[in-house]
Image (cartoon, coloured by chain):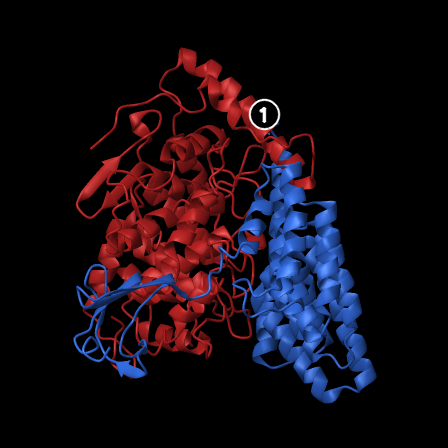
Chain colours: A blue, B red
Amino acid sequence: MHGRLKVRTTAEQQEAKRKEREKKQKIYTAATQRTFQKRENKEYDEEALKITGEILSVNPDFYSLWNFRKEIFLHFKDVKPTEELNKLFEEELYFLESCLKVNPKSYGTWHHRCFVMTTMPIPDWTRELQLCNKFLEYDERNFHCWDYRRFVVKTSNVPAKDEFDFTTAKIASNFSNYSSWHYRSKLLPQLYPDSHHSSGVQEDILLQEFETVQNAFFTDPNDQSSWFYHRWLLGRGCRKLDIDSVYISRHKSCILVTFTKTLLISRENSINLVINGKDVEGEWLNQKQQAKYSTFWISFCNNFWCSS
Amino acid sequence: MEEAQTKLRFSSPKHSRNKFDDENISTESSVEQIRVEDAISVIIDEFNKEIESDPDIPVLKRDEHTMFLWKGLRHLGISYECLDASRPWLCYWILHSMEILEETIPIMTAKEIAKFLGKCQCSTGGFAGGPGQVAHLAPTYAAVNALCILSQVTDEALNVINRETLYEYLLRMRTDDGAFLMHEGGEVDIRGTYCAASVAKLTNLCTKELFKDTPQWLARCQTYEGGFSGAPGLEAHGGYSFCGIAALLILNATKHFDIKALLRWTVNRQMKYEGGFQGRTNKLVDGCYSFWQGGALPLIHMVLCAEEDPAVSANSWLFDTSALQEYLLICCQHPNGGLIDKPGKTRDYYHTCYCLSGLSVAQHFTSGHLYHTKVVGSPKNAVRSIHPVFNIGVEAVVKAKSYFSHQVPVHKDNGKTS
């Protein structure tokens, strides 16, 4: 804590500490040197697994060692019988779990787990989903774990409905957890698709969701999560490109169009203007008379008045 | 132009009204939020008593921070085994903090660090977390930034970088859709793209072949919230948002995303009571987001100015810069030096670097010919201004760009990005 004085250690204690540190450092340096050497010599054996494992269990962010372990396992895949191989992979999963307990936010560890699951002969995906549940219970905002969950769901074809129910339960236990709301917004268009709607979700489902989120912000209007989700439900976060309004002026010989999103009208990205069944060509410029991104576009056409 | 000292937000009797109200419904998130606010309100009360007798506070504890930084620099490579795959990061965090605090780095030290970073460079290109390790884009970014900072002390620094192999390495990390792997066999996320774009820009290696389709991939990372996520489809996050907009600016491709949505999301991440920033929707304040979120606002400003948006201010970034300075100076300084995430947390070099970077952004406003400084507390608190795209000193960027501008691009197609 701040402002608290540190108790002075005696010179003797300091010396002992220094020696201890020196000893640890020697072991550590020797171990890393040995692994680099083994990798260089392509010695893919149990010893390599053991030494890299010892270092990774203290420092799971040592990504080079995960690379080495990948090479070892790919080698095992070529030389070991399936049963033994699967057992080794299972042990690797246990080891990874212990590393995740040391640092649940280590990029390398989660990534290596993806490798193990996609490389092992008989992967148990149900167990992985349970692991995600466990880690999300421990920290429900851990985005590494949410990412891994998406990977598990996608690779093992977990029904979207199951995941949707999972978010319902998560939100019921803590409606402030925005990660759950966000995940829900990704599941709804999969479960109840409707391409005509700006959010891509069926209207009746949106209304049900509206009810749920309304409960959340009636309960606590200061909570950010529900408002973000509400914004998504209303389709304001992801507007579909559409024509907002069209105005034609005969007097000025021009056509004005406003769009729901900014866009660039150019030769590559042009607009087909058809008047009385005839294609009409014209140059499009924005409100500043420039060919730059805008929601507002004007075309001064010189040839369509006579035809109408 | 400097502005006279105004009354502190923390000292206003109305400030407690900014506290979070859970309306008697507590959730895990609301309990944590209230705990943080309670801890901060104790600090504010103490501070308000102190300021009566010492009107100069809050003061930036420059000497203490510098001592803490020197300690870390000397011990590098001896007692930092736990960060053994992030050693160039430690160099960068410490050197950049020193740069912000205007602490001079002796030439011998600079040469020594440059030499060490050279040992982290791989023969096949890029920099690794330590000598003998595999190259990785994050330490590559850190090493290049650190060398740019050192280039102001010694010309040897930039000479360490092997541009030919670096370019080959960057090309190898590129995926077909224009994103970047963090390292061989590693994960793909937006950090990789920012790191690649940043080092390529500083060393004059930005080519069409290297960043083909990258802006489109980056744009896919913007979520409906407005911020950017680590990869398409995930939740928006402060660190990733910074990477997204900074990379788009470097690649001159800011047309590809919704700037207003990003602005809206970013400004709403500044906490009402604490004054610092949170990283994601409904998370807690953290000093490091002073830069990841606060530092994104100068970038947003650049984009809006380029679009000639009449709504942009001519003397301030679009967030409460004083509130952020109050949070950093009053709540994030460790009494023995170094800066922290939030009260109760331990100090480290990562938080020291990003708290100071955020402080610098909050103090200095520059836009075209306009310049405006607003320093909370003692006028001595003013720190050096940084370049928010790369997060190194402006002078360091100028030096690197001029150094590498004389060197020919090493790519095959000879076509540079616009």
Indicate left or right for A26 with B16 as reference: right
Determine which quarter of the picture holds residue A55: bottom right
Does residue B166 appear left or right of residue A38 in this picture?
left
The residue that disc 1 covers is: A4
Disc 1 residue type (three-letter) = Arg
What percent of the width, then of the height, locates residue B402? 20, 61
Residue ID at (32%, 55%): B111
Q: Residues within 10 Å of mark 1 (few under 14, many from 20)?
A: few
Q: Residue at x 64, y 69 (%)?
A: A190
In this view, the residue in front, B110 or A131, is A131
Hey, which residue is sitting farthest right in the picture? A83
Q: Nearer the viewer, residue B40 or B315?
A: B315
Is residue B105 visible in the rendered image? The answer is yes
Q: Is residue B328 above or below residue A162?
A: above
Residue at (51% x, 28% y) in the render: B18
| Left or right of A298, for residue B131 | right
From the viewer's perspective, is A137 left or right of B179? right
Q: Which quadrant, please, contains the N terminus of chain B? A: top left
Q: Nearer the viewer, residue B63 or A283?
A: A283
In the image, is residue A275 above or below residue A21?
Answer: below
| Residue A258, percent from left and from top | 33, 62
Measured from the top left, where is residue A265 in percent x and y?
29, 71
Quadrant location of the C terminus of chain B in the rendered image: bottom left
Tell me if residue A80 comes above or below residue B143 in the rendering.
below
Residue B120 in sight in this render: no
Q: Chain of mark 1?
A: A
**Residue at left 81%, top 81%?**
A84
Secondary element type, mark 1: loop
Q: Position of residue B378 (x, y in %)?
A: 33, 24
Depth check: give the residue in front, A85 or A299: A299
